[in-house]
Image (spheres, grey):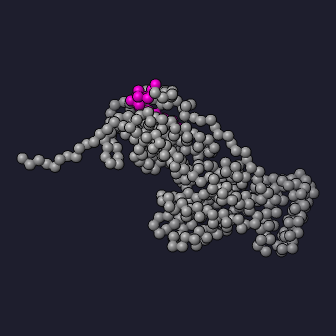
């Protein structure tokens, strides 16, 4: 009798499995896709090396998820706690709506494996535990609890048996006390005083190409935009060295505004696919996070430097009037109680209406006198900006 082909041998081993994902990731993507991808990559750059440092092996990082295998369940638990404490610290200075919180599940069980993947209920249970964990929390199976209790300085809460999806038998679940995963809130840097003219910081653009070698292009784009914006005489632009301290960090624009002393923030992304390049940019009000302007630019990499120059010029040309409009609206909300300053303001408006250089210079002189009497006179500040713009054009 002829025997059939020999079936491949199934390889098994006992392993501790850690599964993690970002709570509410789809919602974050729907609100701000570029910013969410940037923040996720920044967090992954910190979190993924922690897995290897604790003796783990990364199996998958699809989307916002992480699947890792450990030979020691204690190492897996220590890694999960370290990740959550690190994320709590990184989120401390981030606006609540933009915080990314991992949910983590840990299970210990028999798994089937090959050269690159692991399979079986040992993996599936870890994934189900992750799905019931609270944002910023860790859920573990009874097997994990029995192996680490007494060996780690942690407090556990028994949350009972759970019927997990596609798992035949109920699993008793414990969660690690959330108090032990928190860290003291970071001290907030003192806010810098705002300059006496509209101010902007250009943050490092997110490289969405998936190719680390394209970082040079994204960084070069930002440098070109900073240079182009610096040519606008009435605009105060933060230097590259200061804005690039935020590279790879998850921040919100209000924090940037406070720390750098700016009213506006420009952020964006670069995506390269085949022979096409797409750059997106958005202008934000750093005082409240409101979107003022956004656009995208497409091109080819045949002449990288020409594309950078064209995009930078377009961005500068488009956001200049957007900034001017925003600054005018902001300024007109601040009235004055000084009647002399108000009279000088009215004279300046009449002079400016002539639309010639001499009259505009006269208007600027009158506005200067008004601002000497009331430096916070919003309407006068707005006219001063408009006069500077008129002189630039005349």
Q: Position of residue 264 (x, y in %)?
A: 69, 56
Based on the displayed image, in which of its 4 quarters is residue 265 positioned? Answer: bottom right
Asked if residue 186 is positioned above or below residue 258 in the image, the reply reads above
Residue under the point 56% across and 59% down:
269
Most extreme residue toward the left is: 1
Based on the displayed image, in which of its 4 quarters is residue 126 positioned? Answer: top left
Asked if residue 52 is positioned above or below residue 107 in the image, the reply reads below
- The answer to whether residue 136 is magenta is yes
The quadrant in which the C terminus is found is bottom right
Most extreme residue toward the top is: 150
User: Is 66 or 292 nearer to us in this picture?
Assistant: 66
From where the camera sits, is residue 379 visible?
Answer: yes
Residue under the point 67% across and 40% down:
187
Residue under the point 55% across and 64% down:
217
Number of numbered tags placed on the structure image: 0
In this picture, residue 346 sits left or right of residue 292: right
Based on the displayed image, in which of its 4 quarters is residue 343 positioned? Answer: bottom right
Q: Which residues are magenta?
A: 135-150
Q: Position of residue 252 (x, y in %)?
A: 63, 49
From where the camera sits, is residue 158 visible?
Answer: no
């Amino acid at each position: 009798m002829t025997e059939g082909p020999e079936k491949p041998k199934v390889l098994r081993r006992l392993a501790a499995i850690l599964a993690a994902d970002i709570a509410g990731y789809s919602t974050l993507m729907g609100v701000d896709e570029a910013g969410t991808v940037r923040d996720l990559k920044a967090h992954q750059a910190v979190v993924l090396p922690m897995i290897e440092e604790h003796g783990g092996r990364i199996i998958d990082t699809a989307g916002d998820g992480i699947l890792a295998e450990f030979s020691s369940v204690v190492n897996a638990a220590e890694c999960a706690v370290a990740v959550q404490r690190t994320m709590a610290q990184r989120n401390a200075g981030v606006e609540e709506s933009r915080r990314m919180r991992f949910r983590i599940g840990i299970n210990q069980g028999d798994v089937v494996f090959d050269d690159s993947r692991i399979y079986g209920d040992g993996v599936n249970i870890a994934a189900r535990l992750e799905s019931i964990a609270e944002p910023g929390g860790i859920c573990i199976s009874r097997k994990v609890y029995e192996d680490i209790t007494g060996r780690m300085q942690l407090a556990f809460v028994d949350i009972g048996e759970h019927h997990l999806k596609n798992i035949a038998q109920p699993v008793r679940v414990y969660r690690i006390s959330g108090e032990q995963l928190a860290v003291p809130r970071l001290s907030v840097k003192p806010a810098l005083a705002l300059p006496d003219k509209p101010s902007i910081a250009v943050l490092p653009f997110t490289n969405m190409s998936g190719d680390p070698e394209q970082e040079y292009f994204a960084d070069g784009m930002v440098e070109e935009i900073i240079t182009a914006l610096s040519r606008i005489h009435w605009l105060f632009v933060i230097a590259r060295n200061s804005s690039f301290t935020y590279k790879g960090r998850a921040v919100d624009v209000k924090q940037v505004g406070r720390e750098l002393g700016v009213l506006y923030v420009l952020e964006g992304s670069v995506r390269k696919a085949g022979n096409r390049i797409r750059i997106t940019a958005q202008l934000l009000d750093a005082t409240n996070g409101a979107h003022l302007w956004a656009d995208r630019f497409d091109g080819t990499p045949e002449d990288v430097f020409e594309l950078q120059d064209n995009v930078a010029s377009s961005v500068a040309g488009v956001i200049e009037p957007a900034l001017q409009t925003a600054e005018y609206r902001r300024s007109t909300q601040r009235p004055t109680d000084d009647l002399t300053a108000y009279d000088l303001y009215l004279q300046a408006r009449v002079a400016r209406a002539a639309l010639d250089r001499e009259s505009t210079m006269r208007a600027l002189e009158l506005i200067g006198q008004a601002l000497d009497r009331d430096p916070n006179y919003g309407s006068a500040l707005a006219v001063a900006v408009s006069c500077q713009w008129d002189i630039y054009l005349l």
